[in-house]
């Protein structure tokens, strides 16, 4: 990669100047861009757990991705580098450092266009200004009268309430969800199942917030007053990861280990659709709908079970296949598009303003783009 240069604090380069990897694929074009952080990953320290037996952070840092509607820019969290990455529509990339040990993860824009981020290792949720600097930060760790210090809830996922002003987050380490009200009050609510490991949180069209419980094997519906109702997933040990609203008025989520995509109605009825996999060690990550109602899902080889090796990629499901009663999806309605890189540890995927699907590869530290070819393209 050829860098255009570095600002005094934040590195700046352009995707147009780097050498991407590309995979034409049948019917779609897949391009990956390396995310070259200008500083090395931070070593383990207070609030930051070691991810490897040797005591160094887990390889890879590129986590969440969100679209800035006002400008069309993409924002990415680089957790182990304590940095955010902003990719402008013209491909210019800017690295924005945050406090050491902060561990940024979840990202969301409120209705006013302000960016919020969970600082997982610091136990805070922060609002950033237009330059990416922290404008205000809220401590969301939990009080404990018998503990030497507050308990870090490890705020992980982030979502904006239906009012566009209330900020919701998941307490991954404490089995809690919390919110920051428009007047700055922090409130925390315990989920009914202890140790449920809440991961993702998103607003639904029904006015509630919806949460995936990774180890609880449930989906939680959280009312505006914080009261949660849990719904069990039919597949045992499915490990639900991401959840998003669908164009049909339901919520849709991925099961990392269950290898299903599922819809859940506002009343809590869950219907699962099996995602084909060539090997049992293929698992799922994020999901997103495009403007035509197609559902895009990340599928990759579990790096804890690397054999047999296989291509990581993106699965596309046509709308007609998602209206059925569940079970096996019709093969003619499903497409798999491999990505050039192996051992990606896929993480999240969203629809960009350009109509392409953009996705992050956590372990490979890459940003991916996939777009369907037009009829007649070569």
Image (spheres, rainbow, N blue to C red):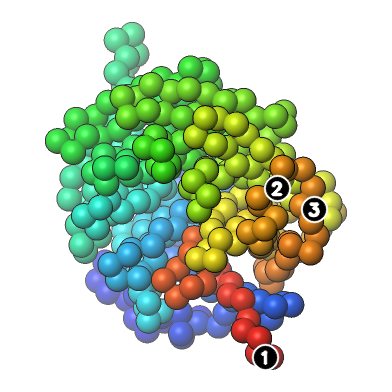
For the residues carrying marks 2 and 3, which lies nearer the camera in this image? Answer: 2
Please tell me which residue lies in front, 133 or 339.
339
Q: Secondary structure at mark 1?
A: loop
| Residue 182: % across, % down | 18, 38
Q: Which residue is mark 1?
A: 376
Q: Residue at position x 45%, y 79% from top? A: 15
Q: Residue at position x 26%, y 39% from top? A: 166
* Mark closer to the chain start, 1 or 3: 3
Q: Quadrant of residue 163?
A: top left
Q: Is residue 330 left or right of residue 77?
A: right
Q: Is residue 229 above or below residue 276?
A: above
Q: CA distance from mark 1 to mark 2?
A: 31 Å
For residue 200, say whether it is visible. yes
Q: Is residue 327 left or right of residue 299?
A: right
**What is the quadrant of the C terminus in the image?**
bottom right
**Residue neighbourhood size for the residue with mark 2, other residues' Cα within 10 Å, grouped as few (<14), some (14–19), many (≥20):** few
Q: Which residue is mark 3?
A: 277
Q: Which residue is mark 2?
A: 324
| Residue 171: % across, % down | 41, 31
For residue 60, say whether it is visible. no
């Amino acid at each position: 990669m050829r860098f255009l240069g570095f600002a005094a604090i934040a590195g700046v380069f352009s995707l147009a100047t780097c050498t991407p990897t590309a995979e034409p694929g049948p019917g779609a074009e897949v391009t990956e861009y390396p995310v070259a952080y200008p500083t090395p990953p931070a070593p383990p320290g207070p609030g930051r757990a070691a991810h490897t037996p040797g005591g160094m952070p887990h390889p890879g840092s590129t986590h969440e991705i969100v679209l800035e509607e006002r400008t069309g820019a993409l924002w990415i969290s680089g957790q182990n580098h304590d940095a955010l990455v902003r990719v402008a529509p013209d491909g210019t990339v800017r690295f924005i450092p945050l406090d050491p040990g902060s561990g940024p993860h979840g990202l969301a824009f409120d209705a006013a266009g302000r960016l919020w981020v969970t600082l997982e290792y610091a136990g805070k949720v922060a609002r950033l200004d237009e330059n990416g600097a922290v404008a205000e930060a809220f401590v969301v760790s939990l009080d404990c009268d018998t503990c030497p210090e507050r308990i870090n809830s490890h705020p992980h996922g982030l979502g904006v309430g239906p009012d566009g002003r209330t900020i919701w987050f998941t307490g991954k380490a404490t089995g809690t969800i919390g919110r920051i009200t428009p007047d700055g009050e922090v409130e925390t609510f315990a989920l009914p199942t202890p140790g449920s490991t809440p991961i993702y949180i998103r607003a639904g069209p029904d006015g509630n917030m919806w949460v995936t419980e990774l180890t609880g094997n449930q989906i939680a519906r959280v009312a505006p007053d914080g009261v949660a109702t849990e719904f069990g997933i039919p597949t045992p040990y499915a490990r639900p990861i991401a959840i998003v609203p669908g164009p049909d008025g339901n919520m849709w989520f991925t099961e990392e280990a269950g290898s299903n995509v599922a819809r859940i109605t506002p009343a809590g009825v869950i219907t699962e659709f099996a995602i084909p996999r060539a090997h049992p060690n293929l698992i799922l990550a994020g999901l997103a709908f495009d403007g035509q109602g197609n559902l895009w899902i990340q599928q990759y080889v579990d790096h804890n079970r690397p054999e047999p090796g296989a291509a990581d990629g993106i699965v596309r499901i046509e709308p007609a296949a998602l209206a059925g009663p569940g079970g096996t999806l019709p093969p003619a309605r499903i497409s798999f598009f491999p990505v050039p890189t192996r051992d990606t540890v896929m993480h999240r995927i969203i629809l960009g303003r350009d109509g392409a699907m953009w996705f992050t590869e956590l372990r490979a530290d890459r940003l991916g783009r996939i777009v369907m070819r037009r009829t007649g393209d070569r």
